[in-house]
Amino acid sequence: RALAHPGAKPPLLRAGHPTCVPRPPSMSSSTHAAPGEDSELVKVAVLIDELKHEDVQLRLNSMRQLATIAGALGPERTREELLPFLVESVDDDDDVLRAMAEGLGESMVELVGGPEHAFALLAPLEQLATVEELSVRDRAVQSMSEAISTMPEDHIEENALPLLSRLAERDWFTSRIAAAGLVASIYPRAPDGARKRIVTLFQSLCTDTTPMVRRA
């Protein structure tokens, strides 16, 4: 998709499909952009466009700059548009997926609105934690652990525990490996009443029929 001419403001994102950055909140029709502001908007717009470019190197470059993109979109648009877009983008080159997993770690928490919204990062990371490539899974589990470590206590029971259960009970062994990797970060922060359930899940993983799950 072609970018607007230099004098035009980038249109809003389409839900679920980032294509351009929105107008910065500080600007209005009665004010002028600060020097260099338009060029920065165009730069970020290009990064967003290239997230789905056919050239894997361009996709990789954009994915490595998720923080820049999220900073331009703001927390609400990042949660409501960028993250759902990423959930739908996990069928990609392993290097791109690894960059996505790295970009969705602790540094992204503030960009989605802080610890109260850290749970929003779990959806794309859950998808990444189930892929076949080990390095992508490991980085996704690390980023999930980082996000979980910032969550308020009530969000552990509401979001982290259901995530652990889903991963531990799926048929595909990569999900169960990811679950084993999350136990250590979730158990200490779980309420007392939920810890027995975590122990039961962990015992099941320790006796899994797949050797790779038991070793995890």
Image (spheres, helix red, strand yellow):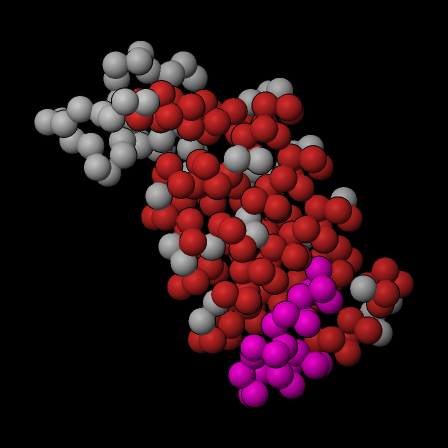
Q: Which quarter of the figure is the N terminus placed in?
A: top left
Q: Is residue 112 above or below residue 56?
A: below
At x 40% / y 44%, what residue is drawn?
A: 78
At x 46% / y 59%, what residue is drawn?
A: 118
Taking the image as drawn, is residue 81 in sight?
Answer: no
Taking the image as drawn, is residue 177 in sight?
Answer: yes
Q: Residue furthest right?
A: 211
Left or right for 8, reference 115: left
Count of all numbered marks drawn on residues in the image: 0
Left or right for 176, reference 25: right
Q: Which quarter of the figure is the C terminus placed in?
A: bottom right
Left or right for 162, reference 114: right
| Picture quadrant of residue 89 | top right
Position of residue 3 measured from the top left corner of the image (x, y, whole percent)? 38, 16
Residue numbers of the magenta segment: 178-200
At x 44% / y 36%, what residue is drawn?
A: 69
Position of residue 32 measured from the top left corner of the image (x, y, whole percent)? 17, 24
Specify whether residue 216 is painted magenta: no
Helix, strand or loop for the magenta stretch, by majority: helix
At x 27% / y 22%, what residue is drawn?
A: 35
| Nearer-the-camera pick, 27 or 87 | 27
Specify whether residue 184 is painted magenta: yes
Left or right for 215, reference 159: right
| Picture quadrant of residue 169 | bottom right
